[in-house]
Amino acid sequence: MNDKREQVVLYGLGHAGKSMLPYLRERFEIAFWVDGNQKLWETVYEGIPVHSPESILNFNGRIIITTTDSYFEEISANLINSGVEKNKIFRGQHHIYNQQEEIIPYEFDMLKSEKIDLEKCDLLRREEKENTYKVMIFCGFYSSYVNQLVRNCKRRFPDIHFGILSNAEQYIVEMENYADHIYVYHSYAELYGILNALPKYEVFQMLWIENIWVYFRKLIREKCERLNLCVGGSDLYRARDAELLYKKYLIDMSDTISAETDATISAFVKIYPSTSEKIRWVNFGVEILEHMEQSQLVKSLKRKKDLCILEEKLVVLCGYNAGKAHQHLEMIRALSTISESIKKKIVLIFPMTYPDNQEEYIESVKKELDKCGIDYRILTEYMDLYTMAQVEMMSDILITIQKTDQLSSTMLETMYAGKVIIAGSWLPYENLREKGLFFVSVSAIDALAETVSDVVVNYKEYSEKCSGNKNIVYAMSSWNVAADRWRRLWID
């Protein structure tokens, strides 16, 4: 039976490839594996030999690339430049939400569409309404930004009918009363079928510039009057050169592009000069601002007491999630060098409620904290908007030194609460100073000890400098203001 199976080569012996191996072995005979890591050449993994990429040139069958998005385009480009025909290049796609695998051809034209019933793909099971102004929000994964955007714009502009297109079913929990449709795809073939079946929309709004939308760009462009893209940090700061070039196909055919900071706009235009006339500043509002008033302040003081934090201690909020990009370990090592007198005056709070599956990393953070000599709390239980507002209002200082960021809502929320922010100077926040906001910058993580010590000793003075931040943040980031910017992006 094995002799009848198609023989293929796998490219990329990383975590993605290893996780897909059982699926691929059920369907193909694997001739060998190739990888760019020279240390793996002429080794064997799970009974499959591993060779150098040059070995592919002597193979006439299909090549299945088993890597993450960031490497796929780069590897594909190298294969094509080496003489491999596009119709032999495929991708092993792993869908995170439903843990499903799929094999995708390099080019959209080679993909076969599933025949689908559009209403059955809609979690809300609603018919499309005629003579309505329709905006479809595209996001391949579950994001609270989708919920915030749809919820806040629908409340203020009920005549706009929103759809959501995604690989995640969680949207049904919060969006049932705000979205008209929630279309969920489970494969590229099913997504092809949904896009084919959709009526023409007034607006397709991408959150964010994901590779999957680039793949379907021709069909997407045909199905909307206006195509808008939103630039996220990973679209720009974490993308490889080949991926940036690939995304240009979708960028070139878009009508407008939005970003949340002037720094992001400048960086984007530097990479894509042709976008200078169609990119604009449109930010997400910050919902939590509505919950950061006097009633929450009382609850925040109770939360401080519940966490057994002495009233006289200054609370230092360290990042806002459990992602390694927040550089918690480096932060802790820097703070461990401050004087004993300062250590006694502070308590560190680490909100680590998301993303999932970070238990090992959180444990490593805890071990580092146990050595540093500073009182701390690690928060791992889910926090809704009200709870997060209480934690931010309970805090006195926020340290945000992640590797990259477009604009942290936690930073804005904490500014609104009148707290002192210490941010990495490498983050694109300088435009906030131009708007009149006050915060402290550190040029390197090693400078944290000196800066935190200075802020603690002179906290009253720093706090007074932050007193004007509240009104500026509201004018910039309240959904009462931000929602109208989105409406103008779609309708004007």
Image (cartoon, helix red, strand yellow):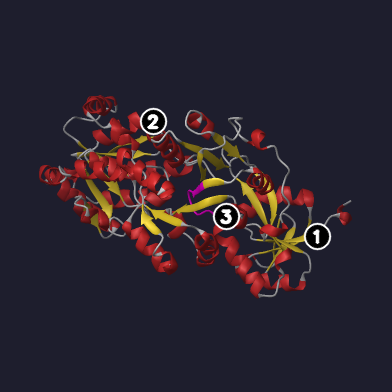
Residue range highlighted in magenta: 203-214
Where's residue 330, x and y in %? Answer: 34, 53
Q: Which residue carries the number 1 mark?
A: 7
User: From the viewer's perspective, is residue 174 above or below residue 284?
Assistant: above
Q: Are marks 3 and 1 in contact (CB under 8 Å)?
A: no
- Residue 48: x and y in percent read 74, 59
Task: State the residue in front, 425 or 339.
Answer: 425
Provide the secondary structure element on which disc 2 rests: loop
The numbered mark at residue 221 is: 3
Secondary structure beneath dot 3 equals: helix
- The residue indicated by pointer 2 is 384
State the image coordinates of residue 122 (x, y, percent, origin top left).
61, 34
Is residue 207 one of those drawn in magenta? Answer: yes
Label total for image: 3
Q: Residues within 10 Å of mark 2 (few under 14, many from 20)?
A: few
Of residues 480 and 367, which is closer to you in this image? 480
In primary-sequence order, the first of circles 1 and 2 is 1
The amino acid type, in three-letter code, at marker 3 is Arg
